[in-house]
Amino acid sequence: MIIHDHHSAVRKRLLRQQQQSPIDQQPAQSDFENSFALRLTFLVAAFVIGLNLLSPDPTPKPTHAVVRPTV
Protein backbone atom coordinates (compact mmCIF):
# COMPACT_ATOMS: atom_id res chain seq x y z
CA MET A 1 0.00 0.00 0.00
CA ILE A 2 1.42 3.35 -1.06
CA ILE A 3 0.80 6.30 1.20
CA HIS A 4 0.78 9.62 -0.62
CA ASP A 5 1.75 12.84 1.01
CA HIS A 6 -1.32 15.04 0.55
CA HIS A 7 0.67 18.22 1.07
CA SER A 8 3.47 17.47 -1.33
CA ALA A 9 4.47 20.01 -3.93
CA VAL A 10 3.85 17.57 -6.76
CA ARG A 11 0.24 17.00 -5.71
CA LYS A 12 -0.40 20.72 -5.23
CA ARG A 13 1.01 21.48 -8.67
CA LEU A 14 -1.09 18.71 -10.22
CA LEU A 15 -4.28 20.00 -8.56
CA ARG A 16 -3.60 23.59 -9.65
CA GLN A 17 -2.95 22.37 -13.19
CA GLN A 18 -6.24 20.46 -13.25
CA GLN A 19 -8.23 23.40 -11.89
CA GLN A 20 -6.94 25.92 -14.42
CA SER A 21 -9.29 26.58 -17.28
CA PRO A 22 -7.64 25.74 -20.57
CA ILE A 23 -7.70 28.79 -22.83
CA ASP A 24 -7.19 26.96 -26.10
CA GLN A 25 -9.96 24.42 -25.54
CA GLN A 26 -13.47 25.68 -26.16
CA PRO A 27 -16.46 23.45 -25.45
CA ALA A 28 -17.90 21.98 -28.60
CA GLN A 29 -20.98 23.90 -29.66
CA SER A 30 -23.77 22.01 -31.30
CA ASP A 31 -25.62 23.35 -34.30
CA PHE A 32 -28.69 21.34 -33.33
CA GLU A 33 -30.50 24.36 -31.86
CA ASN A 34 -30.19 26.16 -35.18
CA SER A 35 -30.82 23.14 -37.38
CA PHE A 36 -33.59 22.78 -39.90
CA ALA A 37 -34.72 19.47 -38.37
CA LEU A 38 -35.43 21.05 -34.97
CA ARG A 39 -37.37 23.93 -36.53
CA LEU A 40 -39.35 21.52 -38.69
CA THR A 41 -40.14 19.37 -35.63
CA PHE A 42 -41.48 22.37 -33.70
CA LEU A 43 -43.49 23.52 -36.72
CA VAL A 44 -45.09 20.10 -37.19
CA ALA A 45 -45.78 19.78 -33.45
CA ALA A 46 -47.43 23.23 -33.37
CA PHE A 47 -49.52 22.31 -36.42
CA VAL A 48 -50.69 19.02 -34.86
CA ILE A 49 -51.52 20.72 -31.56
CA GLY A 50 -53.42 23.44 -33.41
CA LEU A 51 -55.41 20.88 -35.38
CA ASN A 52 -56.29 18.99 -32.22
CA LEU A 53 -57.42 22.14 -30.44
CA LEU A 54 -59.46 23.53 -33.33
CA SER A 55 -61.06 20.32 -34.59
CA PRO A 56 -64.64 19.55 -33.58
CA ASP A 57 -65.34 17.03 -30.87
CA PRO A 58 -65.14 13.55 -32.48
CA THR A 59 -67.61 11.93 -30.07
CA PRO A 60 -71.11 11.57 -31.47
CA LYS A 61 -73.99 13.40 -29.85
CA PRO A 62 -75.90 11.18 -27.43
CA THR A 63 -79.18 9.99 -28.86
CA HIS A 64 -82.30 10.35 -26.79
CA ALA A 65 -83.71 7.01 -25.78
CA VAL A 66 -87.45 6.54 -25.77
CA VAL A 67 -88.55 5.76 -22.23
CA ARG A 68 -91.70 3.67 -22.03
CA PRO A 69 -93.65 3.54 -18.84
CA THR A 70 -93.48 0.18 -17.11
CA VAL A 71 -96.51 -1.41 -15.54
Image (tube, rainbow, N blue to C red):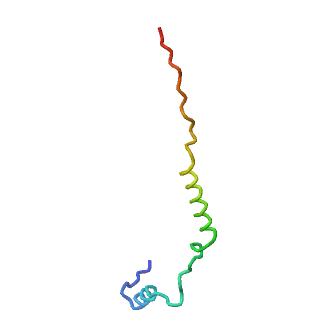
The x, y position of residue 38, in whole percent, is 60, 68
Which residue appears at 57% of the width and 48% of the height?
A: 55
Instruction: Establish if 54 lies above or below 30.
Output: above
The x, y position of residue 68, in whole percent, is 51, 15
Q: Nearer the viewer, residue 42 or 31?
A: 42
The x, y position of residue 28, in whole percent, is 56, 80
Which residue appears at 36% of the width and 87% of the height?
A: 7
Q: Nearer the viewer, residue 41 or 69?
A: 69
**Residue at the extreme top:** 71
Instruction: Establish if 54 lies above or below 3.
Output: above
Q: How many marks?
A: 0
Q: Quadrant of residue 34?
A: bottom right
Which residue appears at 58% of the width and 76% of the height?
A: 30
Q: Is residue 44 left or right of residue 7?
A: right
Instruction: Establish if 66 lies above or below 50.
Output: above
User: Considering the image in quadrants, where does the N terminus appear?
Assistant: bottom left
Which residue appears at 41% of the width and 81% of the height?
A: 3
Q: Nearer the viewer, residue 59 or 17?
A: 59
The x, y position of residue 47, in whole percent, is 59, 58
